[in-house]
Image (spheres, helix red, strand yellow):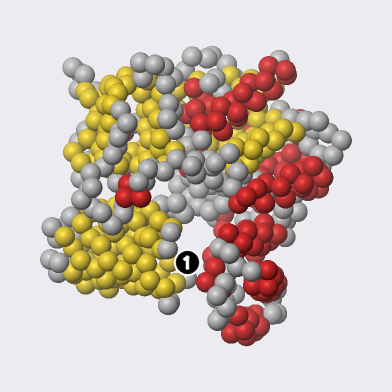
Amino acid sequence: MITGNWVGGIRIDEMLIPILVEFREQENIMEGEITFVQESVTCKIHKINNSREFIAFWFHYLGRRMAFSGKIIQGSKCYGTIQYEEYIGFLHIESYFEIGFEELKNCVGSYKKSNGNFIDCEWNKHSIKYIDFESGKYGVAFPTSPCNFDKKWPLTDNFEKPSQTQMQFLKDEFNDQRRLRFITKESTCVAQKYQSVTTEKISFTNDKFKLAGTLYKPAQSVCWPAVVMIHDQGSKRNGDFWPHPMFFARHGIGVLTYDKRGTGNSQGNWQNSTFSDLADDALGAIRYIQNREDVKRDQIGLWAQGEGGYISSIISQNNIDQISWFVFLSFFPLSPVQKRILDKKINLIRLNFNEYEISEAVEYEEQVFEILGSDYKWNHLDSLFFKFRDRTWFPYADKVYSKYDKRWDFFRLNMHFDPMPFFKKITKPVLSIFPQCDDNRVYKNSIKSFDEAFKEKKNITYKLIPNCDYSLLSTDRREDEENSSNYFSLDAFAKQIQWIEKTIFLKS
């Protein structure tokens, strides 16, 4: 039987997309869902056809019909090809042992090594995500028994190779998980559970909706500085800021995170909202934290990744006296349209397309976005596709299939938002962190924009983090291709804390 939960990935060219798959039987009919973990998108699986050794199904993802057919091995492993339009990829999944939420929750927390470094473990839907703050090693581990976990992401063609990272949660005489044996290719250590941070489930309003969040509090402090974290693009929950909240709180800075409107336990719908609407949500979070007696109200900051920078810029104009400092991570102060076209251009350069091809692709993108923002040019869409569909760069281009394509609603509302007038009014200290990727092209464009906004001001600090991507995952530490590992850039975490502590000290 294929019923149950599976974990794996879809490989398309050099890209591996992590997925979770659930199969269930309902009145003798097989049903299922596939979750794309990084985007937090869940799609219904249709027409499941399976035997002991064969399985086929299809689903819609980002407007595309994707069909899978493959083999089942020993009832616990499945692999095969996935086809969409004229492209073919590969899908691999493994079933995993299921444990209850309470058992999983007992494993979550911080574990302190004998050398003082921490391993943080967080709940992640049937699994545990972890980071070792000594090496930066990061991953997601799934249970093989009630207290044993193996890393299963990303999966590759070689199912037989054992996991290089294993986690064993060891109980004390009171049957509580108090120790963690952390086993990697390089070493084995035992860490003790250590409560350096306490968490509190909270809620607040934006005057229209109720939003739910989590407050991470330094366990060793009575009153502390605080930061509100603002979401990047997509359906984001408060857990998507991990591992920053635990790290900040362990260094004495309280952190408020919340479910984006319309996700998790928060009301509303972000997909039909403007940046100003989302700024109202963040203002609700700021008001909540200002009213707490355990927060130093003159030391409240905003932290924003990516798209959250637009929201922070709006807040900065109207509530500048309430915010003491700003941290921007991987935020590029261009309009969403300008940023998206720049991203496409850089990607085509990386893929070795020539200047004429890139110019043609940019022309196509500009026309697509003009149609997207128009109520009367949709009849040009088919002719635009027909004109460019045979180009070698076309598979890498944006595609809007109709005015009813809901994936673009949020972008349509906000695509021409210009953050620059807002940034020009910021007088408080700003830290802007950029990953060193794309041969610094995005970084240089962003520095130019920031310099324009902050000219003759000395309150902005730039930090370029070498060899890491948009999410601060290292790009220069890869193990063998059969079982690659991810590493966070610990330098990026350290630079943020050092700057915040210095800023708070100067204010004090």
User: Along the horizontal axis of the image, is 293 left or right of 184?
Assistant: right
| Above or below 140: residue 178 | above
User: Along the horizontal axis of the image, is 178 left or right of 285?
Assistant: left
User: Along the horizontal axis of the image, is 147 left or right of 446?
Assistant: left
Residue 492: % across, % down? 56, 33
What residue did someone put label 1 on?
A: 62
Task: Please name the residue shown 81% across and 39% down the image.
Answer: 454
Task: Please name the residue shown 44% across and 33% down the image.
Answer: 136
Task: Please name the residue shown 72% across and 32% down the image.
Answer: 461
* Res 414 seen here: no
Using the rendered view, name the quadrant where residue 54 is placed: bottom left
- Count of marks placed on residues: 1
Tag 1: amino acid: Leu
Residue 166: % across, % down? 27, 35
Residue 484: % across, % down? 36, 46
Judging from the image, what secondary structure is the residue with disc 1 in? loop
User: Along the horizontal axis of the image, is 52 left or right of 306?
Assistant: left
Residue 417: % across, % down? 72, 56
| Above or below 48: residue 494 | above
Task: Please name the residue shown 78% across and 30% down the image.
Answer: 459
| Above or below 342: residue 214 | above
Quadrant of the image containing the N terminus: bottom left
Using the rendered view, name the quadrant where residue 292 is placed: top right
Could you classify mark 1 by the number of other residues whose Cα lies within 10 Å: few (under 14), some (14-19), or many (20 or more)? few
* Res 113 seen here: yes
